[in-house]
């Protein structure tokens, strides 16, 4: 019996957000979040962290191929892109008078669309 519980991390970045890479090979590049992986604490960003994978011959690739894949990257390397400030920001939450919870940029205080 497997008693080890799977850790699910709290990720404030959501699918569809525009993010900027803060460190690493792709530092300064921006892209759109394609998927989030809460159990891995990673996010897949469109056009960032592209790797080449060699594929053996199969039905899809009869000759074999070198396929470019977009791999997930750590959430800690990313920041949400604040277009008004033109830089990375953290995400804060504010509760409206209606009781609705909204995500806002910590730098400017504006609501995240």
Image: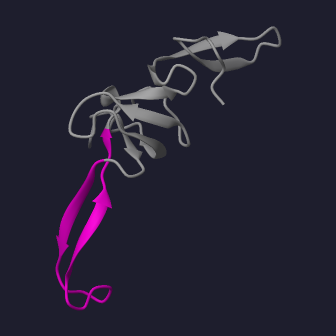
Q: Is residue 50 left or right of residue 89?
A: left
Nearer to us in this view, 36 or 3: 36
Location of residue 58 with respect to 12 vertically, above or below: below
Query: Which range is magenta?
Result: 49-73
Location of residue 99 with respect to 61 vertically, above or below: above
* Residue drawn at (49%, 31%) of the image: 13
In the rendered structure, does residue 64 fall within the stretch colored magenta?
yes
* Residue drawn at (31%, 27%) of the image: 22
Q: Is residue 94 visible?
A: yes
In the rendered structure, does residue 8 fall within the stretch colored magenta?
no
Location of residue 38 with respect to 108 vertically, above or below: below
Nearer to us in this view, 74 or 32: 32
What sort of colour scheme is used for the picture? one colour
Nearer to us in this view, 82 or 39: 82
Q: Where residue 79 appears, x then y in whole percent?
A: 41, 26
The quadrant in which the C terminus is found is top right
Q: Is residue 31 left or right of residue 61?
A: right
Q: Where residue 26 appears, x then y in whole percent?
A: 27, 40
The quadrant in which the N terminus is found is top left
Count of number-bearing discs: 0
Q: Where residue 96 appears, x then y in whole percent?
A: 76, 11
Query: Residue 39 falls in which quadrant of the image?
Result: top left
Q: Is residue 11 visible?
A: no
Query: Residue 64 falls in which quadrant of the image?
Result: bottom left
Q: Residue furthest right?
A: 98
* Residue drawn at (20%, 66%) of the image: 53
Q: Where residue 80 appears, x then y in whole percent?
A: 47, 28
């Amino acid at each position: 019996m497997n008693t080890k519980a799977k850790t699910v991390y709290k990720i404030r970045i959501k699918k569809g957000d525009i993010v900027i890479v803060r460190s690493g090979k792709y530092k300064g590049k921006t892209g759109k979040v394609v998927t989030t992986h809460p159990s891995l604490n990673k996010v897949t960003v469109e056009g960032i962290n592209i790797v080449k994978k060699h594929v053996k011959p199969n039905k899809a690739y009869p000759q074999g191929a070198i396929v470019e894949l977009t791999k997930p990257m750590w959430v800690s390397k990313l920041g949400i892109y604040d277009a008004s400030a033109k830089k990375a920001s953290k995400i804060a939450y504010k509760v409206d008078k209606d009781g609705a919870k909204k995500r806002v940029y910590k730098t400017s205080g504006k609501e995240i669309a």
